[in-house]
Amino acid sequence: MKILVCISQVPDTTSKITFTDNNTQLNTTGLQYIINPYDEIALSKALELTENGNGSVTVIHVGESPADATIRKALATGADEAVRVNAAPRDAWFVANQVAGYAKDQGFDLILAGRESIDYNGSQVTTFVGELLGIPSVNAAKKVTLEGTAAVVEREIEGGKEVLSIPLPAAIGTSEGVAEPRIPNMRGIMSARTKPLTVIDPVDVPVLTRVIRYESPAPKGAVTLVDAGETEKLVDLLHKARVI
Amino acid sequence: MSVLVYTESASGKFKKSAHEAVSYARAVAEQLGTDVTALSIGDVDASELQALGNYGASNVWSVSADRLKNFINQAYASIIAQAADQSGASVIIISNTFSGRGLAPRVAAKLGAGLADGAVDLPEVTGNVLTVKKTAFSGKAFAYTELVSPKKVIALNPNAFELRETGGDAQVEAFNPIVDDRDLTTVIKEIVHAVDKVPLPEAEIVVSAGRGLKGPENWGMIEELADVLGAATACSKPVSDAGWRPHAEHVGQTGIAISPNLYIAIGISGAIQHLAGVSASKTIVVINKDPEAPFFKVADYGIVGDAFDVVPRLTAAIRAYKGNP
Ligand SMILES: Cc1cc2nc3c(=O)[nH]c(=O)nc-3n(C[C@H](O)[C@H](O)[C@H](O)COP(=O)(O)OP(=O)(O)OC[C@H]3O[C@@H](n4cnc5c(N)ncnc54)[C@H](O)[C@@H]3O)c2cc1C
Ligand SMILES: Cc1cc2nc3c(=O)[nH]c(=O)nc-3n(C[C@H](O)[C@H](O)[C@H](O)COP(=O)(O)OP(=O)(O)OC[C@H]3O[C@@H](n4cnc5c(N)ncnc54)[C@H](O)[C@@H]3O)c2cc1C
């Protein structure tokens, strides 16, 4: 079993998100980056599936050299090797083309990614990669098991779930429940330094989308407090606000 | 350059999000001076197809074949791309649902189109460029994304655009795409719909509870409140992590992002990661015994009090308001 795991790095979940240059740039001052939480699940699943010498796990990141610290963390968690495509990740289409460009002749059985990145929230990369490689994809898996040359995947649907079987190779986006998140141990951290991290050049991709500006949500006015003994009053306010 | 909208259905009926997508498509078509073709795939009742005219579709193309009854993203994407080509669509609208997210990138890639996901408003039109306002940073911001390619795909968030009933009639016809067997290798083994529950991402009212409830045995009063409101239930992350509630109910930055008309948060402190996924709610009510809980800062209405005391009384007050005994 040869698995490729897509790793993105995102601002730490406690970050306050602000913008500079007339709201055209993310203010990165003081931002701490972490592995996208869903990607940790993807990586943990890959490690679980290849346990006891049963295959290998390669992680891939599209980004510039400051991301190497994040990539080393993925290696410390247990991935065997890493690839970094040396380019700023413009958008999901760009990222997916880089991943597919690398993966196309490497013979991976499974490509795992997170359900979505918690920064740009595209939920696009997995499906784009599936399309670019001409293989099946599931974008928000809750459970993944292997049965011979197929993956049986439980995916979320509005108000329910669906269980489907897809032939390998396939691309799967993981969410909670797919695997217990693993964290690096001391031995992992030591060995991560010597594991291979290969830097490759990006392929050319036409520009289809461009973020031109950002906006922060409008600040909320002060809360209207209702006395705990006056729930009828709250009902009346909600009625007047036309939400019930 | 018309507008094509894919209308998602379940069990022979269109979802509310599909009607929203048609309303949105109609508004975009008006911006561009063109009309809307709606595409339905799977077995959908004839009256449902006809009724899409009421939301602004001029034409409805319906694909129904046994092997296409169930959603398979590769096959459906191929059909949508064919319909886009044959209808001459330059803009394709898809709902940003779980299935829609598995579809939109494939459609965009087939058409060489730029994709904006998570749209929350109508695009700005400047010549051939559409600028779409979309959620980013898990609800902490919006990003205005320019689609610069000739063809464009927009995935519209549920509950972001209000239904517009235009009262028109639609011309319904069969559409016969070519579907390659290679796009049908996925086998659907089981589909489970919780019939008696409102799906969380589409719900107009959501009742949500956190660690303040102390344990799973106390969720009865939450479900009762949700019941009288016709609401979906949700929870904070530690609650689903502890197995008190299923993961599918976890809202926030690493869970589901929702934007209901009314979000009632009970015994939830309002951590930044939680707020990220719910702050797009139009009205927020917070019930918490701690007056300093951060959630009150983003709430419209609040009650400082013990949930075990307040919630049953709120349920009773709503029941009285609705005129039920
Ligand atoms: C300084 C900076 C500026 C950026 N500006 C923009 C911008 O303006 N617009 C924009 O859309 N994006 C921008 N990005 C990129 C963004 O971080 C994402 O990598 C990219 O947009 C894909 O995001 P998504 O939300 O669509 O991915 P999703 O489709 O939500 O991601 C799903 C999964 O794909 C994988 N994945 C995502 N990104 C990467 C990656 N870079 N490398 C490897 N795997 C990945 C992960 O497994 C992830 O869980 C910027 C990044 C940086 C560092
Ligand atoms: C990477 C990362 C991602 C995360 N993602 C998410 C996410 O997506 N969603 C999410 O929710 N969290 C997320 N979290 C967790 C988040 O930081 C908080 O820990 C979590 O939201 C707190 O849950 P809570 O409000 O239920 O519990 P607490 O913070 O413990 O709050 C309980 C609240 O209940 C109140 N209370 C107690 N008893 C009563 C009573 N009898 N009546 C009324 N009120 C009472 C208390 O005053 C308190 O405010 C994430 C954390 C990390 C690190």
Image (cartoon, rainbow, N blue to C red):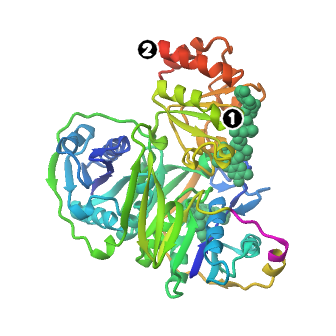
Instruction: For mark 1, name the chain.
Output: B
Residue B251 seen: yes
Tell which circle, 2 or 1, labels the residue nearer the N-terminal end.
1
Tag 2: residue type? Asn
Residue position marked by numbered label 1 in the rendering = B268
Magenta region: which residues? A181-188
Instruction: For mark 2, name the chain.
Output: B
Say which of B307 and B61 sits in front: B307
Please report the residue visible at 63 percent of the width from the left and 34 percent of the height from the top: B217
Residue A21 point in image, percent of width and height: 68, 53
Q: For numbered disc 2, what is the local secondary structure?
A: loop
| Ligand 2 has an atom within 8 Å of the beta carbon of the residue at disc 1 | yes
* Within-10-Å neighbours for mark 1: few <14, some 14–19, many 20+: many
Residue position marked by numbered label 2 in the rendering = B324
Q: Magenta: predominant secondary structure element?
A: loop
Residue B75 point in image, percent of width and height: 31, 67
Please report the residue visible at 73 percent of the width from the left and 57 percent of the height from the top: A28
**Is B300 displayed left or right of B291 in the figure?**
left
Q: CA distance from mark 2 to mark 1?
A: 29 Å
